[in-house]
Amino acid sequence: MSKPVKTLNAVTIRFAGDSGDGMQLVGTEMANTSALLGNDIGILPDFPAEIRAPAGTLPGVSGYQLHFSSFDIHTPGEQYDALVAMNPAALKMNVSNLKPNGILIVNSEAFKDRNLQLARYDHSPLEDGSLDKYQLFEVDVTGLTRKALEELNLSTKVVDRCKNFFALGMVFWLYNRSMDHAIALIKDKFSKKAELVEANLRALKAGYAYCLATEQFATSYEVKPAKLPPGKYRSMSGNDAVALGLIAASVKSGLTLFYGSYPITPASDILHELSKYKNFGVRTFQAEDEIAAVCAAIGASYAGALGVTGTSGPGLALKMEAIGLAVSVELPLVICDIQRAGPSTGLPTKTEAADLLQAIYGRNSEAPLPVVAASRPSDCFETAFEACRIAIKYMTPVIFLSDGYLANGAEPWPVPDSSKLPEIPVQFAKDPESFAPFLRDEQTLARPWALPGTPGLEHRIGGLEKEAVTGNVSYDPRNHEYMCVTRAKKVAQIANDLPSTEIDGAKSGELLVLGWGSTYGAIKTAVEHKQKEGKSVSRVHLRHLNPLPKDLGEILANFKQVLIPELNLGQLLKIIHATYLIPAIGFNKVQGLPFFSSEIEERIDQILEK
Amino acid sequence: MTVKENTIAPNGPVINLSKKDFESDQEVRWCPGCGDYSILAQTQRTLPNIGIPREKFVFVSGIGCSSRFPYYMNTYGFHSIHGRAPAIATGVKITNPELSVWVATGDGDALSIGGNHFIHLMRRNLNINVILFNNRIYGLTKGQYSPTSEFGKVTKSTPFGSVDHPFNPISVAIGASATFVARTMDRDPAHMQETIKKAADHKGTSFVEVLQNCNIFNDGAWFKYTEKETKPENVVYLEHGKPLVFGAQRDKGIRLNGFTPEVVSLKDGKYSEADLLVHNENDPNSTYAYILSHMMDNTALPIPVGVFRSVETMLYEEALMQQLKTASQKMGKADLQALLESGDTWEVK
C-alpha cells in the first residue's frame, strides 16, 4: 500500500534534544543528504556552551535547524514546518516557533514525571490539549529503538544513544530522502566499533520502516532539487571555507601557510581543519595562549610565511597589542575573528557581530588596518583569500570577520576552478644595493619584505618608531607624524584596489538597506520580497569595511533613506554617520541569533510607510 | 679566545667573520657602566666562531633594557613587545628551521610579563637560544622590583620592602624541561663566551642566565659573586665530570647530604674530593640540576656557575618537519583543485 507524497517548495525542520542526544550529528546528516539531493540548504546549529548540561533540563537543549528547498534560499528559515523533540525540555524550548498545523514528532517515552519536572511542566503537554494546533506524532522513540536493537546484546546506555538515528530514519521517510549517505556516514564514523555500526544502522532503518508501516504517518513529502547554476557542488561550512581560502591563498602566493591559534569557540574548527593539510605544508601551531598565537604568526611572516591567526572576540582583545606591532613593523598577517556574543565570555556558542569597532579601532594609538567581512558560509572562502591578498600586497595585518552563524552554518558551494583564482604575487627583497627596510613601493606604499637568511640585507625592525626609509629608531617629531600619516594613507588607498560596489536593485530610490557580515541572507530575502511587492528598496552588502569602497558615499546619496541592520547596537551605523554625515537608521538585534528576514521586512515596511 | 677565526659552515663555505661584522651602525645607548655592554661584546666575539653565516642569525627581543640588544647586532633583528619574544622566535624557527634564532630578554620580560611564553618555549624544545640578562630590577621603567628581586627589596614601588618571593630563573627553566640550562656573569667575559658557544652548539632550547649589574638602579646586586675579593668563596664553577670544588685555596667542596647540598672542607682530613658531588651535566634526570639550582637560595652555599644541564631530546621543529614529510608521502602531492573538490560533491546540470 503506497502512501501519498506531497510536493513542497521548501521545508524548515528543527531537531531538538539533550546536548548529548546527537542532534547536531543527525541534523548535519539530514542537511548533507538534502544538499546531495540537489536542494539548496541553510542551517542554524543552536547549541549550549556546556558540553553536557544536566540531562533533561532546559539549558541542556541542543537544536539543529535546517531549511531545504527547491529554489534559491539565503537563510536557515524562521518558523518550523516540522519539529522533532526528543524530550519535554526540547519541546518547551522550541514549540512556540512551530507553524500552526506543523509536524511535531515527540519521543513519548521521555514525557514522564522526572523529565517533565526538569522541563518545568506541571503536567504532560501531550495530555492537556495545548498541542492540538499541531500534527502531533507521539512515537516511543526510545522503546522502539530498544526493540530494534534487542538482539545485539548491548547495554541500555549504548542502545539509547542510537535513538537519534531512529529519529533521523523517521525524518528521512517523512521527506523521502535516501538513506545511502547516512549509511555510509555510520559505517565511517563508527568504523572502529563494528557493534555500533550495526546498532546505528538498525536504528536508522527501524525509524524509516516504522513510518512506512504504521498508519500513524499517512503522508510523506518531497522537496525537488533546486535550480542552481550548473556545476560541481559541495556543502560548505563557514569555518571549513576559511581553511580552504587560506590554503588557496598559500598555493596562489607560493607562501607557506602558518596558522597559530589557541582553541576558542567558534573558531577552533579552522585549526582542526588546517591541521589535516600537512601535505600542503601547512604549519599549524596550537599556542599556549592567544598572544603567543598571534606573535608566532608575526614571527612566521617575518621569516617569510603567510602568517595567520584565528580567534573569537575575547581572543582578539588579547591579541591587539601584537596586531599593533604588526601594523608598526608592516608585515603581512591575517587575523580571523569568528565573532560571538559578548561582552567578556558572553554567549560563546551564540552569534553576534559586535567586533567591528574593535577590529577597526581597537588598538592603542593610530594603528589602521584593513578589515573585511564574509557574508555567507561559502563566502568565507573568497573573503579569507581576499584578506591574504591585501595582507601580502600591502604588507599589513588584515582582520577577517566571520561569526558563529557563518562558522557553523553551511550551504551548497559551487566548487571553484582553482586555475581561475588570481595569483598573489610575492616579491622578496634580494638586492643589498637598493634595499632599505622602509623604502616604500610608490604605488602600494608597501615596504620591502626581506627575509632573514638573505645575505647583505641584515636589518632591524621593531615596535619603536622607525625613521622613514632606513627603519632606524627615530624620535624625530616630524618623522613620527610622517610615519603615522603614511601608515594611514597606505591603508586608505587600498580603496583604489577594490571593485565597484554592486547594488541589488535600482541605483536610486526610497530606501537602501546596507549590510555587512552574516546578515546577508536575511537582508537579501527581505529586500527581494519587498522588490517583488514593487517597493523602492535596494540593497548593498559590504565585504570591505576598512577602507570602505570609494563609490559608497555616492551610492548612499542616491537614496532618501538608508537602513543598516546589524547584530550589534549600531557599529557600522556609527561609521557611516561619521564618514558620510547622513542620517542612516540602525536596526539592531543582540539575542545571540541571526536576523529573521521577516523582522527586516517589517522594519522596511515601517520606514516606507512613514 | 681569538677575535678572528676561520670556521667552516655546516654546508661548506669558509666563514670569515670577526667581531666587527656583528656590530651594527647604531649607537649603543645603555647607561655607561651597564653590564649589558659586556653581554653584547661577548656575543659579538662568539658568533663569528660558531660556523654560521651572519645572515642566518636572527635576534628577537621583547621590551626592557636588555631588549635593545638586537639594534646593536648587525644581524637580522626584531625588537618586539613586552614578554613575547619567545613566541615570535617560535614562529620564525618553525617557518625556517635553518636560521639561528636568539632571544635577548630580561628578568621582567622573561619571567614576569612573558612568563607563560618562556616556559612553553622551554618545554617545546625548539632549537632557540635564550639569553636572560638578570639584574634583579626594572631598569627601563626606572627602578621597580622584578620577579628575581630578593624578598624585602626596597624599590620605588616597594618603599616598605617587597613582599614577593623571587623566582630562580635556573629552577624555572629546569622545571619547564629546558634541555640546556647555564649561568654566567657579565664580569667574566671568558666564561660568558664559552657559555654562549655551548648554548649555540646545543641542539634544543638553550637557556643562559647572565648575572648582570645595573649600576643605576641596583648597583652591586651580584658583586658578592662577580668581584674578585668575594667571588672565590661564593661561586663554584661547574665543570662536567669534575667534583664541585671552590674557594680561593680550592679547599672546599660540595657534598650531597640526602637531597641537600652542603659545604665541606677538604683541609681537615674528614672529606676528600672522592666524597664530593661530581658534576654531570648530561644527567637525563633533572633532579640533580634542580638541586644545584637551589643552592642560590641558601646563603651558606656558593652559587653554581656554568652548565647545569645539557641533554638532547627531539626538537619540536624536527618532529613537525617529519610530520609534514610523512603527510606528503601518505596524502600525495598537494593538489588544490582536488582539495576543493574533496568530500561529498554533486553535479547540477
Image: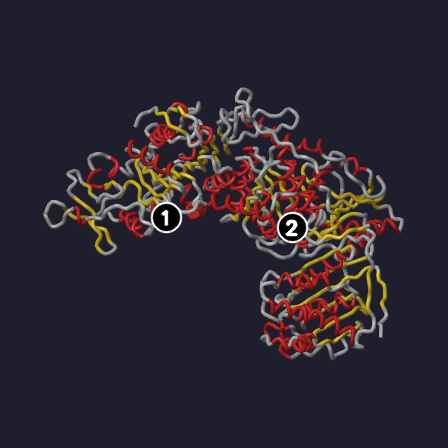
Image mark 1: chain: B
Q: Which residue does the numbered mark 2 point to in the structure image?
A: A239
Q: How far apart are marks 2 and 1 (CA)?
A: 39 Å
> How far from the left and from the top, in percent, is residue A507?
84, 39
What number of labels is visible?
Answer: 2
Query: Badge 2, how many Cα within 10 Å: few under 14, some, many 20+?
Result: many
Q: Which colour scheme is used?
A: secondary structure
Query: Badge 1, how many Cα within 10 Å: few under 14, some, many 20+?
Result: some
Say what amino acid the circle numbered 1 marks. Answer: Val
Say what amino acid the circle numbered 2 marks. Answer: Asn
Nearer-the-camera pick, A598 or A171: A171
Q: What is the secondary structure assignment of the residue under circle 2?
A: helix
Q: Which residue does the numbered mark 1 point to in the structure image?
A: B172
Q: What is the secondary structure assignment of the residue under circle 1?
A: helix
> How far from the left and from the top, in percent, is residue A343?
60, 52
Rendering quarter of residue A68: bottom right
Q: Quadrant of the N terminus of chain A?
A: bottom right
Image mark 2: chain: A
